[in-house]
Structures are given as C-alpha cells and as structure tokens.
Image (cartoon, rainbow, N blue to C red):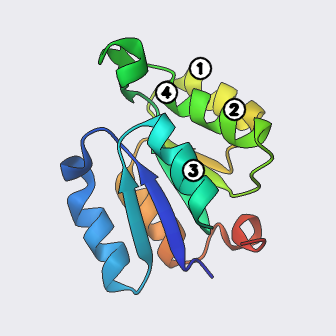
C-alpha cells in the first residue's frame, strides 16, 4: 500500500489535479521541484514511491531545462542505495529505455496512468519495501 510519495516536478501546477486526487485517497504527497530538493527530502523522510518528470528546469544547470533530470534522479537514488521505487513520466522512447536500465519501475507519458497505477496498487510489488 502506498502511504506517501515524493512528487518531483518543476511546474507542480501541471499535476495539481492528479496530486489532489492522490491526496483525496489519503496518500501523503510531498512536492519538490528539483533533484537536489528530492534527495534532501529522501534523506529526511521515507516514501512509498517517487514520481518524477523526465525533464525539468534545474538551478544547478543555470535554470535551463535538463532533459535528463529524471534519469539523473533515478541514478542518484540508486547510487545512494535508496530502495524507494521510482515512476517517471516521459514521452521519449530513448529516455524510457534508459529509465528502466537505471531502475525505474514504470515509465509513462500519462499522469492519469500514474494515478491509476497508484490507486489500483499496480506497483504494489515494487512498493512493498516501504
């Protein structure tokens, strides 16, 4: 069962409806906008799941769009031996392949699909550890 999740996105208003729907089911959702903030949150709390967009603006790259921000986050999560499952949303096929290689449990271009996966516990096996 997913009790809490970390949502990493530079423009959270784009996901406001999905995030509110998750909160309405009783899931605690923490929103952060950068990879750095995500790592800090993961060091301070435990989450059942991490949801990250594939690309986002990152201060460490001068506020420019980092097309591999999601991949970088997955890589850093695994390097830091954080076992929390990661779901990434991206529509780029090459990014999807790389995300799975790095350890993502799911990659989709649809936030609604993420919502359905979470609510129906489709990622239950991957999320058991937390």
Q: Mark 2 sits on what residue?
A: 75
Residue 124 to residue 64: above or below: below
- 117 left or right, relative to 34: right
Q: Which numbered dot is residue 94? A: 1
Distance between the alpha carbons at the discs numbered 4 and 2:
10 Å
Q: Which numbered dot is residue 87? A: 3
Tell me the crowding category of disc 1: few under 14, some 14 to 19, or many 20 or more residues within 10 angstroms, Cα based.
few
Residue 122 to residue 8: above or below: below
| Front residue of this view, candidates 31 and 93 | 31
Lower position in the chain sequence, tag 1 or tag 3: 3
Lower position in the chain sequence, tag 4 or tag 2: 4
The x and y percentages for residue 99 are: 65, 33
Residue located at (71% from left, 37% from top) = 100
Could you tell me which secondary element the residue under label 1 belongs to?
helix
Tell me the crowding category of disc 2: few under 14, some 14 to 19, or many 20 or more residues within 10 angstroms, Cα based.
some
Could you tell me which secondary element the residue under label 3 belongs to?
strand
């Amino acid at each position: 069962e997913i009790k809490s999740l970390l949502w990493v996105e530079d423009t959270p208003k784009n996901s406001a409806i999905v995030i509110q729907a998750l909160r309405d089911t009783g899931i605690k959702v923490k929103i952060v906008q950068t990879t750095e903030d995500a790592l800090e949150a993961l060091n301070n709390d435990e989450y059942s799941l991490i949801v990250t967009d594939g690309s986002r603006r990152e201060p460490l790259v001068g506020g420019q769009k980092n097309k591999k921000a999601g991949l970088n986050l997955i890589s850093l999560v695994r390097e830091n031996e954080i076992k929390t499952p990661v779901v990434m949303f991206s529509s780029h096929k090459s990014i999807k392949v790389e995300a799975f290689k790095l350890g993502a449990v799911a990659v989709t271009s649809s936030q609604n699909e993420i919502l359905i996966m979470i609510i129906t516990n489709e990622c239950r096996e991957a999320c058991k550890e937390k």
